[in-house]
C-alpha cells in the first residue's frame, strides 16, 4: 500500500495536537504584540497630553498649585469664554494627538522599509524594541514631570508626607474669631449672640481689584504709573507697606477665602472626589461652601450688618456665589442679575464693565448709607482680567493693551472713591482697596517680560478709617488681612486673631503665645502648606469619608 503523506491526522491525535500548538502560539504572540504596540502608543499619547497640559497652563496662568487646579476644574462655569476653551482643547488635546499620529505614521513607514531591508532580523529587532521600551517610559515620565512641576505636585506630596510624620498643621493655629459674640466650640456660622461689640462699629466697603499689585505704579518698569488715578484719589489714606499673596494662592477665590476666612483654600481631601465639590460652578451648584469656617460675612452678620456683594463676573464661577451666601451675604449681584436688569456693557468672556459696576455701586452704597443700619459692601472689579478686552470708554493709547485697560479701571475706582467722599460715606465707614491676588506671570499674558523676573512682589492696598489707622505690623500676608478687616470695622476681636491670621493692628507683644507670629519663616511655610485633611473635611462638612 502506498503511504498517504498528505493525510490529515485525526482530531485529538498526538500528531494533530503537536501541529496545532505552534499555530495557536503564533496567534497568541501576534495578539500580545499588537496589544504591546497599542499600549506603547497610548503611553506616548498620555505623555504628550500631560506635556501639552503643562505648557498650556504655564502660558495661560503661569505656575499654579494643585489646589488651584482641583478647585477650578469643577467650577469653570461662566469663565474665560470660548477662546480660552478652544485654546485649551488645541494645545492639550489636538496638537499632542496630531504629533503622536504623525510619529505613528512615520514609525510604521520606517518599520516597513527596515523590514524589507532585512534590518529587523535578529539583533536589529531587539534594538528597535529596546528603543521603544525606553520611549514608552521616558515620554510619559517627561509629561508627568512637565505637568507636575507646573502645578507644584512635589510640594503637594511633601506636605502630606510632613503631616503623616506628625508635623504641625494650620489646624493647630486656627482660631474662631471671638468678637463680643460667643462662638461655639466648633466654629462656623452657628454662633450665639452675646450682645455685640462694645466698640464703635463702622460700615465697611471692601473693593477687590482684579490682579492689581504695587509694581504697576513703577514708571521705570512700565513706562507709566498705571495706578496714578487711584493713588491720587486716596491721597492721605493709609496702606500696608507689604501685603503678600499667600504661598500657594494666586487666584480670585483663594484671595477671597484667605482675606475673609483666614485660611488657604483647600479641597476636602487629597483629590477633588467629593460630589458636592464637583458641583461647584454648575447650575445645580452647591448649597454650602466651607460651611464649617467662620468668615468675615458671618462675623458682620452676627454684629447686625447688612452684607451686599456686587461683581461683574458670573457668581457660579468657582462657587463664588455659594461662598458668599454661605457666609452671611444678604444680597449677591453678579452677571446673571446684570443681564436681567438690561445691562449691555458686558464683555463676552467674563462680564460687566467696571464703569457700569461702579455706577451701580454708587447707587447701592448711597441707599445702604441712608438706611442707617451698619452695612458692608464688597466689590470685585473685572476689566483687568486676562485676556485683554478694551471697552469704548477706554482709549487705545498704549502699546500693551493691558496698560490702558488698567489705567481706565483705576479711573473708575477713583470715581467711586470720590463719590464716597462727596456723599459723606467716608465719615463713618472704613474702606479697603486691595488686589485679589498678584497678576499671573504667564507668557501669554500682559506684562510677562516685566514681571517674570521681578522679586518681592506685593499686593496693592489702600485703607481709609475716619480717624486714621496705625498698623503695628506693616508686612503681612492675606491670612492676617481677615482679622485686620474685622478690627478696621471697629469690632473688638479677642487676642486680635481670626482664622490663622493675626490683625496688623496688633503688635506681637499684644498677642498671646501660640499664634503664627511665633513661627520662623521655614516653620510658617510648612504650616501654611500643610494639608490638614481632617480639618478641611470638617470645614467642608463632608465627614471622615471625604
Image: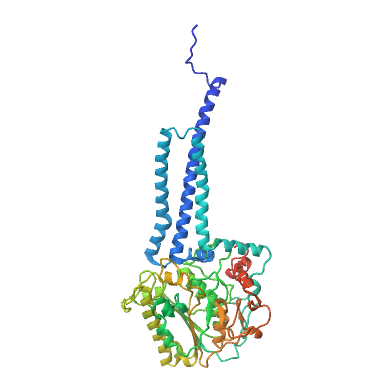
Image x and y of residue 205, in percent: 48, 84
Q: Residue at x 66, y 62 (%)?
A: 164
Work out whether residue 428 or residue 444 is closer to the camera in this orientation and state it.
444
Q: Residue 264 lies in what quarter of the image? A: bottom right
- In the shown orientation, is residue 169 left or right of residue 348? right
The answer to whether residue 426 is seen in the rendering is yes
Q: Is residue 95 above or below residue 528?
A: above
- In the shown orientation, is residue 258 left or right of residue 355? right
User: In the rendered view of the protein, which quadrant contains the C terminus?
Assistant: bottom right
Image x and y of residue 287, in percent: 52, 70
Q: Residue 169 lies in what quarter of the image? A: bottom right
Residue found at the far front of this picture: 220
Image x and y of residue 350, in percent: 39, 71
Q: Residue 357 lies in what quarter of the image? A: bottom left
Work out whether residue 423 or residue 484 is closer to the camera in this orientation and state it.
484
Q: Is residue 93 above or below residue 500?
A: above
Q: Is residue 43 above or below residue 437?
A: above
The answer to whether residue 282 is seen in the rendering is no
Q: Residue at x 32, y 77 (%)?
A: 397
Q: Which colour scheme is used?
A: rainbow
Give the number of callouts: 0
Residue found at the far top of this picture: 1
Image x and y of residue 56, in percent: 44, 61
- In the shown orientation, is residue 277 left or right of residue 218? right
Amino acid at each position: 500500500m502506498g503511504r498517504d503523506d498528505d493525510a490529515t491526522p485525526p482530531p485529538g491525535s498526538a500528531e494533530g495536537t503537536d501541529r496545532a500548538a505552534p499555530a495557536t502560539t503564533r496567534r497568541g504572540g501576534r495578539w500580545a504584540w499588537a496589544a504591546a504596540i497599542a499600549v506603547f502608543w497610548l503611553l506616548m499619547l498620555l505623555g504628550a497630553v500631560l506635556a501639552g497640559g503643562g505648557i498650556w497652563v504655564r502660558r495661560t496662568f503661569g505656575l499654579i498649585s494643585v489646589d488651584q487646579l482641583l478647585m477650578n476644574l469643577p467650577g469653570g462655569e461662566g469663565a474665560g469664554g470660548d477662546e480660552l476653551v478652544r485654546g485649551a482643547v488645541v494645545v492639550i488635546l489636538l496638537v499632542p494627538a496630531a504629533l503622536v499620529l504623525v510619529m505613528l505614521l512615520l514609525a510604521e513607514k520606517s518599520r516597513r522599509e527596515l523590514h524589507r531591508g532585512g534590518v529587523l532580523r535578529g539583533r536589529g529587532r531587539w534594538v528597535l524594541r529596546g528603543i521603544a521600551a525606553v520611549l514608552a517610559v521616558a515620554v510619559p515620565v517627561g509629561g508627568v514631570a512637565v505637568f507636575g512641576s507646573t502645578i507644584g505636585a512635589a510640594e503637594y506630596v511633601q506636605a502630606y508626607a510632613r503631616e503623616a510624620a506628625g508635623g504641625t498643621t494650620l489646624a493647630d493655629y486656627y482660631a474662631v474669631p471671638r468678637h463680643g459674640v460667643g462662638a461655639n466650640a466648633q466654629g462656623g456660622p452657628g454662633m450665639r449672640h452675646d450682645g455685640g461689640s462694645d466698640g464703635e462699629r463702622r460700615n465697611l466697603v471692601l473693593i477687590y481689584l482684579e490682579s492689581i499689585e504695587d509694581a504697576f505704579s513703577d514708571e521705570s518698569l512700565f513706562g507709566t504709573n498705571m495706578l496714578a488715578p487711584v493713588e491720587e484719589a486716596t491721597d492721605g489714606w493709609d496702606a500696608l507697606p507689604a501685603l503678600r499673596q499667600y504661598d500657594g494662592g494666586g487666584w480670585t477665590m483663594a484671595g477671597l477665602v484667605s482675606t475673609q476666612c483666614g485660611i488657604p483654600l483647600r479641597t476636602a481631601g487629597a483629590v477633588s472626589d467629593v460630589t458636592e465639590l464637583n458641583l461647584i460652578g454648575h447650575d445645580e451648584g452647591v448649597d454650602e461652601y466651607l460651611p464649617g469656617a467662620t468668615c468675615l460675612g458671618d462675623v458682620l452678620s452676627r454684629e447686625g450688618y447688612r452684607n451686599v456683594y456686587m461683581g461683574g463676573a458670573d457668581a457660579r464661577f468657582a462657587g463664588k456665589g455659594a461662598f458668599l451666601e454661605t457666609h452671611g451675604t444678604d444680597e449677591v449681584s453678579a452677571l446673571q442679575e446684570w443681564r436681567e436688569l438690561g445691562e449691555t456693557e458686558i464683555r463676552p468672556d467674563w462680564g460687566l464693565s467696571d464703569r457700569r459696576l461702579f455706577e451701580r455701586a454708587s447707587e447701592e452704597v448711597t441707599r445702604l448709607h441712608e438706611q442707617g443700619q451698619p452695612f458692608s459692601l464688597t466689590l470685585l472689579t473685572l476689566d483687568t482680567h486676562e485676556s485683554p478686552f478694551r471697552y469704548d470708554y477706554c482709549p487705545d493709547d498704549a502699546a500693551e493693551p493691558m496698560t490702558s485697560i488698567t489705567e481706565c479701571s483705576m479711573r473708575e475706582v477713583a470715581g467711586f472713591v470720590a463719590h464716597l467722599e462727596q456723599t459723606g460715606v467716608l465719615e463713618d465707614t472704613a474702606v479697603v482697596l486691595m488686589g485679589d491676588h498678584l497678576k499671573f506671570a504667564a507668557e501669554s499674558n500682559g506684562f510677562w517680560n516685566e514681571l517674570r523676573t521681578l522679586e518681592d512682589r506685593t499686593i496693592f492696598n489702600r485703607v481709609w478709617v475716619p480717624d486714621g489707622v496705625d498698623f503695628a505690623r506693616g508686612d503681612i500676608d492675606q491670612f492676617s488681612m481677615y482679622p485686620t478687616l474685622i478690627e478696621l470695622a471697629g469690632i473688638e476681636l479677642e487676642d486680635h486673631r481670626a482664622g490663622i491670621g493675626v490683625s496688623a493692628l496688633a503688635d506681637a507683644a499684644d498677642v498671646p503665645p501660640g499664634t503664627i507670629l511665633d513661627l520662623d519663616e521655614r516653620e510658617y511655610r510648612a504650616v501654611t502648606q500643610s494639608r490638614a485633611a481632617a480639618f478641611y473635611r470638617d470645614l467642608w462638612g463632608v465627614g471622615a469619608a471625604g
